[in-house]
Image (tube, grey):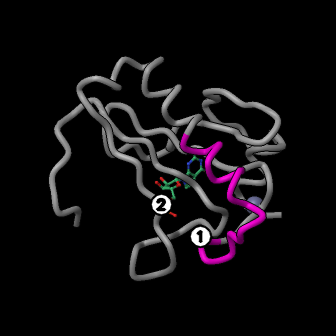
Amino acid sequence: MCLFCKIIDRKIPSKFVCEDEYVFAFEDINPQAPVHILVVPKKHISTMLEAGPDDNELIGRLFQAANKIARDRNIAERGFRLVINCNPDAGQSVYHIHLHLMGGRIMRWPPG
Ligand code: 5GP
Ligand code: ZN
């Protein structure tokens, strides 16, 4: 079982943010911004490349959850960043899809 599957199953503790039937959200252990939350599907999908057409609704749910959390954390209006890293060049380190929700500071562009 992968690290994030264990966090979803609460076999490994995390700072819980919210969940529903399909999606689980928790604080990143090494935050890169005042708000840095990971939004993950409860279904194990290792990378974005493995997300197929059958997962379209699920992927949409990740983004809808991120919208809700951004509003709840009061960063919606000033702005925030959503990132999915895929494979080594992008720096993916945990092979269970996760949407990074980052905000609470000015985000630079281009990212490193
Ligand atoms: P990636 O580099 O794969 O896009 O992002 C993985 C993220 O997971 C990193 O930002 C890292 O800080 C976070 N992370 C890694 N291990 C843990 C953990 O055990 N708990 C939590 N909450 N976050 C983790
Ligand atoms: Zn997993």
Q: In the rendered view of the protein, which quadrant contains the C terminus?
A: bottom left
Label of residue 84 in the image: 2
Which of the four quarters of the rendered structure image does ligand 2 lie in?
Answer: bottom right
Amino acid type, label 2: Ile
What residue appears at the point 35 percent right and 25 percent down from the top-left corner?
76
> What span is in magenta?
47-63
Quarter residue 36 falls in: top left
- Pinpoint residue 75: horizontal percent, then vertical percent: 33, 24
Left or right, residue 101 beside residue 50: left
Is 57 magenta? The answer is yes
Asked if residue 81 lies left or right of residue 36, the reply is left
- How busy is the neighbourhood of tag 2: few (under 14 within 10 Å), some, or many (20 plus)? some
Give the x, y percent position of residue 19.
Answer: 72, 31
Q: Is the C-beta of the residue carrying label 2 under 8 Å from the nearest atom of ligand 1? A: yes
Q: Secondary structure at mark 2?
A: loop
User: Which residue is identified by label 1?
Assistant: 48
Circle 1: element type = helix
Along the line of sight, the residue nearer the viewer: 2 or 89:
89
Question: Is 102 located above or below residue 47 in the figure?
Answer: above
Q: Which mark is residue 68?
A: none
Q: Is mark 1 within 8 Å of ligand 1?
A: no
**Residue found 27% across the figure and 33% down from its top:** 79
Point out the tag, 1 or 2, that comes first from the N-terminus: 1
Asked whether the beta carbons under mark 1 and mark 2 sit within 8 Å of each other, the answer is: yes
Q: Please report the residue visible at 69 percent of the width from the left and 39 percent of the height from the top.
A: 24
Question: As displayed, is residue 60 above or below residue 50?
Answer: above
Query: Measured from the top left, where is residue 101 in percent x and y?
Result: 44, 42
The amino acid type, in three-letter code, at marker 1 is Met
Q: Position of residue 50 (x, y in %)?
A: 68, 75
